[in-house]
Image: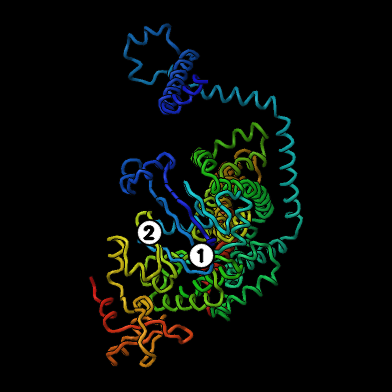
Amino acid sequence: MSKIIANNIYKIFGPDPLSVMHLLQQGIGKDEVLETTGHTVGLDNVSISIEEGEIFVVMGLSGSGKSTLIRHVNRLIDPTAGEIIVDSQNIIDLDKKDLINFRRDKMSMVFQKFGLLPHKNIIDNVAYGLEIQKKPKQERHSAAMRQIESVGLNGFEYMYPNQLSGGMQQRVGLARALTTNPDILLMDEAFSALDPLIRSDMQKQLLELQVKLKKTIMFITHDLDEALKLGDKIAILNGGRLVQVGKPEDIILNPADQYVSNFVQDVNRAKVLKVKSIMIDTIQGSEGPKVNMNDSIESCLPIILETRSKLNVVNDNDDIVGSISDKEVANILRKN
Amino acid sequence: MVLIKFMVKFIKKYSNYILYTFLFAIFIFLLVNGYQNSRYKPDSLMSVLGSTDWLLNWPKWLDVRLMHWTNDGFGSFIKAYGKYFDVVNDFLLGLIYGLKGILVLAPWPMVIGIVIAITFFASGRSLYTTTFVGIATFFIGFLNPVFWDKALETTSILFIGIFLCMSAGIPGGIAMARNKRVRNFFLPVLDLAQTIPAFCYLIPGIMLFGLGAVPAIIAIFIYAVPPLMRLTDLGIRLVDEEVIEAADSFGASSSQKLFGIQLPLALPNIMQGINQCTMMALSMVVIASMIGTRGLGDEVLLGLQQLNIGRALEAGISIVLLAIVFDRITQAYGATLQSRRGDREINKK
């Protein structure tokens, strides 16, 4: 059973959303619906499923409905139609009180512009989720301190959010989300407001934390490089419709349509693709240089150029599982 | 059943036209009613239509009877419910004279000392503001020894008025911010309360409570509560949407959001509202001297009646000083609140 399942989600903004449902079901597009009925289509029949412990990236340009989609998972937005199942429970059925408890226990969210509370200092910001749960102050603060340390902000706990830089503020946001120890993290363009160096720093930190924590993370971004770097799976939205879902290499190697291939054509394939996605099964002897199957193609390029021979591909236990030669590398790097 | 369904559909579809027809009918009723009850109505309608005189000057019979209705309605209202207003009157009067009694009884250096202490802490220990307010307070009595007790009386009326404004205005503003319908209802009411000339509030006050301090308090309330309500509403609505979303995403209940986030973040705006409320209340208390409210206002009135320029000037200055004291204290407190979440320096731990 998947951790989060969204089934046939529709979201329409306007005075009478149900009245335009049948237009969408007939396959009429977002622009036409807006023109003829004045209703804005947020999501058009989106279904996804997210497995426990994976980073699921939702990607799309602005207006594609990605921020709307993530807000359905904790019901900051209610769908016009469809169901959202978290841990085998349809959360659309929850009443107000159950919804509040569900939000307290199951998940927390990180925001693009951080959403920190300007009138509270860092430690109280980080402890906010526990304060809402009416936990005693002692417990709140010790839990908050652990997370402040884990994101490397020791010494800043009695400062106020506006005294910190953007990157530090977002670390506070991340620490705040982790303090309640939820199974699920929702990250809405969490790193988009940061400058590139700090962004890649934060991406690295998130991946390092994820190795330890094994949370189920739904991550929204408009940046393909970020999606490829973080995502175990990537979903691409366009105009409220789901265009493609797959592993990063699927997206690059088999784009579902023109929209996706436009997206991926400028990607540095050597950097993103792993050796395992292009290796061939034939094994020939155990001599010769070896590369790990999870390395990027870029990292084995120097060896291939140097030796001009086939390389053996090994898994993490050093068993040979296949081979790779200059021919495969050349094929994959050639742009269509 | 079918008929009812059809009617509901019909009303929904043509609701605009039905509304306009209704309003037009009311207008026609007002015209006919005003004409028929007018003392100046001509002998026959035909004689009007026959001549063009009535088009040149506004005819006396073209007169809506709002004044009659109001006076009649108010008269029977007082006859029926007057005794309840007496209770309110006694209660408010008791409050005012209780407070005034304490203030007047206290030795004047002690009162000045208390004002200075309040200013010192409200302004975040600003020596400049504290000194300034202390001197201003001293000069109220220094200008004319009679003024000191009168200023205290004005102050007690102000306090009660502002207390009433706050206890209704802040919850009212919160309700406006949380519910669009409440806001749509209150906004025109507040517009009305702010545009009707301040004098007009005194008249129903006199009729309900007689002369003195209580009608002044009623007038203060109507006149000074709108800015407080508006600024409370605005302050709450200006709280960053993403901060509210963050609170929601952690499962905050609506009271946790209100008291933990919205009100604290709206506090500088609310303080600004209290400041505005205070200033408007002070101006009303001066106007109210015309209906026998005692205090600094009646000194101005006396100066005016006796053509005693010196006295009027002294009284005017003392009112300004009182205004400065109130303004500085509330402003300084608002600024202190603002700095607590705003421009705090990093190395000022």
**Mark closer to the observer (1, 2):** 1
Q: Where on the picture, by quarter, is residue A225?
A: bottom left
Q: Is residue B239 left or right of residue A137?
A: left
Q: Is residue B84 above or below residue B118?
A: above
Q: Position of residue B311 (x, y in %)?
A: 58, 50
Q: Amino acid at mark 2?
A: Leu
> Disc 1 or 2, which lies upstream in sequence?
1
Residue at left offset 55%, top offset 58%: A86
Q: Secondary structure at mark 1?
A: loop
Q: Name the quarter where the C terminus of chain B is drawn.
A: bottom right
Front-most of residues B105 and B83? B83
Q: Residues within 10 Å of mark 1 (few under 14, many from 20)?
A: some
Residue at left offset 32%, top offset 11%: B51
Q: Amino acid at mark 1?
A: Glu
The reply to whether residue B3 is visible in this rendering is yes
Q: Position of residue B207 (x, y in %)?
A: 64, 31
Colour scheme employed for the rendering of this structure: rainbow
Numbered circle sitting on residue A51: 1
The reply to whether residue B330 is visible in this rendering is no
Q: Tag count in the figure? A: 2
Q: Residues within 10 Å of mark 2 (few under 14, many from 20)?
A: many
| Protein chain holding label 2 | A
Q: Where on the picture, by quarter, is residue A300?
A: bottom left
Q: Which residue is disc 2 drawn over?
A: A237
| Protein chain holding label 1 | A
